[in-house]
Amino acid sequence: MTELPARRLLLVHAHPDDESINNGATMARYAAEGAHVTLVTCTLGERGEVIPPELRHLTGPALGAHRRGELAAALRALGVEDGRLLGGAGRYGDSGMMGIPDNEDPGCFWQAGVDEAAGRLAEVILEVRPQVVVTYDDQGGYGHPDHIQAHRVAMRAVDLAAERGHRVDRVYWNRVPRSVAEAAFGRLQDELSVLPFDKSASVDDVPGVVDDERITTTIDGGAHAAAKAAAMRAHATQIEVAEPYFALSNELAQPLFTTEYYELVRGPARGAGTDLFGGLEEAS
Ligand SMILES: [Zn+2]
């Protein structure tokens, strides 16, 4: 088996596009620095709403297959080579937004057993042996069932992997500091008239917004802003980009953050301020 790079980062996401929106700059930065970056995506997002009219005929498995191609293009834009689908393509279906009948589909990710799905993720963790795992908070950032389930599965998998021989040093949740979100929406209001979007989203629409003091780690991805925007554009069925803003299928403009923020929830905080791995080398 070939030796993996010294720094190894593993991110767990619900659907294709979540990785680019939340962590695109971080992934591009660490890949460029020579770290091994592994993305595990739990569903193909086949219940997502499609933005371009010419692609709206894509639904269900056809949309999933198309989004798999979008995800591959996004990872190329980010310079990330190790993208995986939890349990293989189509193992877990998109559950749709919270409260709809699709949530009851026995094949959807929301209905999967946490231990069963976490066992599959733990196998990836044991193979890659990441020092750092990134996922969502316990609300999945904003309450989507697949995001909540991705959180549960990721946290459980870290425990299972520890029992089986690999202890992840740090776990982070994706965050946006409230002051940063408020300032960005203030700028957005001023610029909205010249953007290709009619209306603005609000701070409450942004996943993972918390009070500033909970932020432990700030990743300046400015050097990778173009890669992040390109990765988001690769998800053309889901995202319309007009830097430094974007919109999802609701057509509400929101900021495209190239500085990305994290809350360390497990592991030593020392050295973690501007580097997910900071301070870990001397310990490992
Ligand atoms: Zn998602």
Image (cartoon, grey):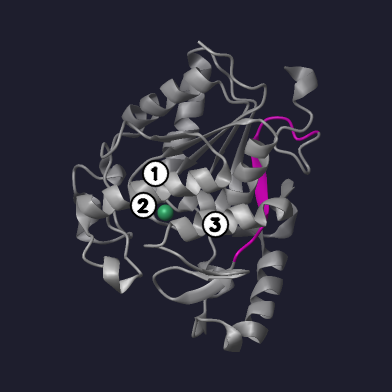
Residue drawn 80% across the image and 20% down it: 282
Kind of residue at badge 3: Ala
Real-space Cα separation, disc 1 to disc 2, in angstroms: 6 Å
Asked if the beta carbon under badge 2 is closer than 8 A to the nearest atom of ligand 1, the reply is no
Real-space Cα separation, disc 1 to disc 3, in angstroms: 28 Å
Which residue carries the number 3 mark?
230
Real-space Cα separation, disc 2 to disc 3, in angstroms: 27 Å
Kind of residue at badge 2: Pro
The question of residue 13 being in magenta is answered with no
Q: Earlier in the sequence, mark 1 or mark 3?
A: 1
Residue drawn 81% across the image and 35% down it: 271
The question of residue 262 being in magenta is answered with yes
Asked if the beta carbon under badge 1 is closer than 8 A to the nearest atom of ligand 1, the reply is no
As drawn, the label of residue 14 is none
Q: Residues within 10 Å of mark 1 (few under 14, many from 20)?
A: many
As drawn, the label of residue 149 is 1
- Provide the secondary structure element on which disc 2 rests: helix
Please identify the quadrant where the C terminus is shown.
Answer: top right
Which residue carries the number 2 mark?
145
Relative to residue 51, is residue 227 depicted above or below? above
Report the magenta residues as a range. 256-270
Q: Examine the rendering and report whether any part of residue 240 can be seen.
A: yes
